[in-house]
Image (tube, grey):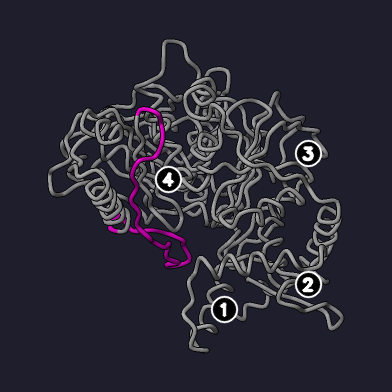
C-alpha cells in the first residue's frame, strides 16, 4: 500500500540505464527501495569495423523498457504510471556521438568497445601528461581529426550515450561529472574540465582551422544533486509515444554506468571500491590522493560527486563465458532436456568451485573485442591447454571464470602493489555475481582482499541512477552524496562478505602467471588474420 501511495503522490524516482546488453528501468519509493522495474534486451552491432547501436535501437529500446515498467506497476499496484517525482538517465561510459547544428548524428555512435584510437590516445597522453584511454570521447575526436574525417568541421556538439538521451529529453547539454571525466580530464578541485588541458588541445588542433573550441562542443559538467533540467513535452513522447507520461519531471545529471555502479554499491567515499563485472569489467577505487604518475592501464575519473577515482577497466568479461554456457544449453536440448538458463548458469558456476585452484593448467582469453589493458586492438576468444593439462568440466569452467578478471587484474596490480592504494571496502556487482558465492569468492581470491555483495547488487546501475534522481529532490541542505547513501539508502545493509581463500589466492596467481606468459598466443591469433 505504501508503494502504491508513493506512486500516486509522485514520491518516487525513476532510473533508466542503457547497458551493453540490457536497458533497464527501476522505480524507487521515498525509502529508495525498488518497487517496480522494466527491461529490454539489445545487442551492439559490428558494422564497417565499428561497434555501434543505431538511434532506432536506442529509442525503441527505451520505449519498450518503459512500457515494461508501466506494465509492472499496473500489475503490482493497479495504477497507471503517468508521472514520477524525479528521473535520471545512465548509460555505458565513454564513446563518441558527434552532432551538427541541426542536431543530426554525423557518424554512427562509436561505443566504448572500439579500440581504434591508439594514435590519438598516445599523442594526447603525452601532451597532457595524463592517461587518455582509447575509449574516451576526446581520443575518438582527435583520432577522427588525424584520420581527416570530413564530419569533424561540422561538429556542434559531442556527447556520450546518456548525455545524448538526456539532451533529447530535456534540451539541456549537460553530463554528470563522473562520465564527463570519461570524455575529457577534469579538475577535481574545480569540479569542471581541466582548462589548461583544454587550452593545450585547442592549440594542438588550431592549424586545422575548425570553427569550434573544445569547451564549446562539450556538455557542461555537473556534480550529483545539481538541477539538470526537466522532462519536456517532446522528451516525454520520446519515452512514451502514447502521451500518458507527463512533462515537467525534474531530472538529475545523467551519469555513466561506472558512476551509477559506485552509487548502487555505496562506494563513493574515499578508500571504498567496487568491481562491476558484466560485458566489461572494471574496478573503481576512490582515492585519498593523486597517483604518483600516469599509467596507461589506469583511467582517472571521478565519483558522481566529483571525487578522484582510479579505474582499472577491461573491455572483456562475460561475453565469451556466456557463449560457452550457450553451447551447454544446445547440448542439453540436443539430449532432449529442457535447459533453464538460471539453473544452467548456477550448476556450471558451482561446478567450477570443484576444480583445481590453478585450473589444472588450462588457459583462456575472453577477448571478444580488443583489450587495451594488454595491448590488443582486436580480440580473438581462445581456449588453450597442453597435453598434460587436467581437462575436466570443473577446471574448464573455473578457467572461464578466472579469465573474466585476468585483464582487470593487470591494472589492479598497479594500484594495490605499485601505488599502495588502500581499500577498506570492496563490493562486487553485475552478472558475474548472480550465482551466490561463486564470482564473489573468485574475485576475493583474485584481489586477495574481502569482497562484499549486497542483496540489491543485482538491481545495478538503473537503481544507482534512480538513487541519484532521489538525491536531487530529497537531499537536505548541505547533505553530501555519501551521507545520503549511508543514512537514507544503505543504513544497516553491509551485504555478505567473503574472505580470500589462501589456496584460491595461490591458484589465481598461478593462473595469472600463465595468462601473462601466454599473451603471445593471443597475439599470434590476432596477427594471423584468419578471421
Q: Magenta residues, as a range?
A: 30-56
Image side of residue 440 versus residue 422, left or right:
left
- Alpha carbons under labels 3 and 1: distance apart: 37 Å
Residue to which mark 1 is pinned: 328
The residue lying furthest to the left in this view is 243
The residue lying furthest to the top in this view is 477
Image side of residue 517 versus residue 117, left or right:
right
Residue to which mark 3 is pinned: 416
Task: Name the mark nearer the viewer: 1 or 4.
Answer: 1
- Alpha carbons under labels 3 and 2: distance apart: 26 Å
Task: Name the mark nearer the viewer: 1 or 2.
Answer: 1
Residue occupying image coordinates x 66% and y 44%: 312
Task: Name the mark nearer the viewer: 2 or 4.
Answer: 2
For this rendering, which residue is in front, 418 or 324?
324
Which mark is first along the chain, 1 or 3?
1
Q: Quick one: SS at disc 4?
A: strand
Asked whether the residues under the numbered discs 1 and 2 touch, taking CB atoms below 8 Å apart as contact, a structural biologist would say no
When the figure is inspected, residue 472 is found, relative to residue 41, above or below; the finding is: above
Residue to which mark 4 is pinned: 91
Amino acid at each position: 500500500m505504501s508503494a502504491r501511495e508513493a506512486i500516486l503522490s509522485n514520491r518516487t524516482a525513476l532510473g533508466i540505464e542503457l547497458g551493453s546488453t540490457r536497458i533497464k528501468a527501476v522505480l524507487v519509493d521515498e525509502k529508495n527501495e525498488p518497487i517496480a522495474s522494466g527491461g529490454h534486451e539489445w545487442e551492439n552491432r559490428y558494422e564497417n569495423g565499428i561497434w555501434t547501436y543505431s538511434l532506432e535501437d536506442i529509442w525503441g529500446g527505451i520505449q519498450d523498457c518503459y512500457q515494461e515498467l508501466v506494465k509492472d506497476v499496473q500489475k503490482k499496484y493497479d495504477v497507471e504510471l503517468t508521472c514520477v517525482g524525479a528521473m535520471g538517465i545512465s548509460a555505458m561510459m565513454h564513446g563518441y556521438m558527434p552532432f551538427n547544428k541541426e542536431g543530426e548524428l554525423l557518424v554512427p555512435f562509436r561505443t566504448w568497445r572500439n579500440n581504434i584510437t591508439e594514435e590519438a590516445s598516445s599523442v594526447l597522453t603525452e601532451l597532457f601528461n595524463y592517461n587518455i584511454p582509447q575509449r574516451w570521447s576526446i581520443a575518438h575526436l582527435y583520432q577522427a581529426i588525424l584520420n581527416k574525417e570530413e564530419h569533424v568541421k561540422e561538429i556542434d556538439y559531442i556527447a556520450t550515450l546518456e548525455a545524448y538521451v538526456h539532451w533529447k529529453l530535456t534540451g539541456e547539454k549537460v553530463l554528470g561529472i563522473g562520465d564527463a571525466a570519461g570524455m575529457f580530464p577534469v579538475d577535481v578541485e574545480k569540479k569542471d574540465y581541466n582548462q589548461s588541458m583544454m587550452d593545450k588541445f585547442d592549440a594542438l588542433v588550431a592549424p586545422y582551422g575548425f570553427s569550434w573550441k573544445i569547451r564549446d562542443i562539450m556538455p557542461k559538467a555537473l556534480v550529483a544533486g545539481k538541477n539538470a533540467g526537466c522532462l519536456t513535452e517532446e522528451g516525454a513522447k520520446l519515452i512514451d509515444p502514447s502521451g500518458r507520461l507527463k512533462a515537467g519531471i525534474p531530472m538529475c545529471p545523467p551519469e555513466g554506468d561506472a558512476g551509477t555502479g559506485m552509487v548502487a554499491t555505496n562506494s563513493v567515499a574515499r578508500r571504498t571500491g567496487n568491481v562491476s563485472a558484466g560485458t566489461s569489467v572494471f574496478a573503481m577505487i576512490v582515492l585519498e590522493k593523486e597517483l604518483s604518475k600516469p599509467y596507461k592501464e589506469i583511467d582517472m575519473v571521478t565519483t558522481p560527486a566529483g571525487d578522484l577515482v582510479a579505474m582499472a577497466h577491461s573491455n572483456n568479461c562475460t561475453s565469451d563465458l556466456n557463449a560457452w554456457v550457450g553451447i551447454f544449453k544446445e547440448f542439453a536440448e540436443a539430449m532432449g532436456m529442457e535447459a533453464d538458463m538460471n539453473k544452467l548458469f548456477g550448476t556450471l558456476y558451482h561446478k567450477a568451485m570443484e576444480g583445481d585452484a590453478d585450473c589444472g593448467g588450462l588457459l583462456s582469453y575472453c577477448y571478444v573485442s580488443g583489450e587495451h589493458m594488454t595491448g590488443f586492438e582486436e580480440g580473438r576468444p581462445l581456449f588453450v591447454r597442453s597435453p598434460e593439462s587436467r581437462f575436466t568440466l570443473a577446471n574448464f569452467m573455473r578457467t572461464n571464470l578466472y579469465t573474466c578478471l585476468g585483464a582487470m587484474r593487470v591494472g589492479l596490480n598497479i594500484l594495490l602493489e605499485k601505488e599502495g592504494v588502500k581499500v577498506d571496502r570492496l563490493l562486487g556487482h553485475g552478472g558475474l555475481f548472480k550465482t551466490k558465492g561463486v564470482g564473489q569468492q573468485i574475485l576475493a581470491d583474485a584481489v586477495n582482499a574481502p569482497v562484499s555483495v549486497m542483496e540489491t547488487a543485482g538491481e545495478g546501475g538503473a537503481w544507482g541512477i534512480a538513487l541519484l534522481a532521489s538525491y536531487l529532490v530529497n537531499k537536505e541542505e548541505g547533505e553530501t552524496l555519501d551521507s545520503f547513501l549511508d543514512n537514507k539508502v544503505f543504513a544497516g545493509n553491509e551485504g555478505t562478505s567473503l574472505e580470500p581463500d589462501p589456496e584460491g589466492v595461490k591458484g589465481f596467481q598461478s593462473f595469472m602467471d600463465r595468462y601473462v606468459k601466454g599473451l603471445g598466443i593471443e597475439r599470434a591469433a590476432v596477427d594471423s588474420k584468419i578471421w
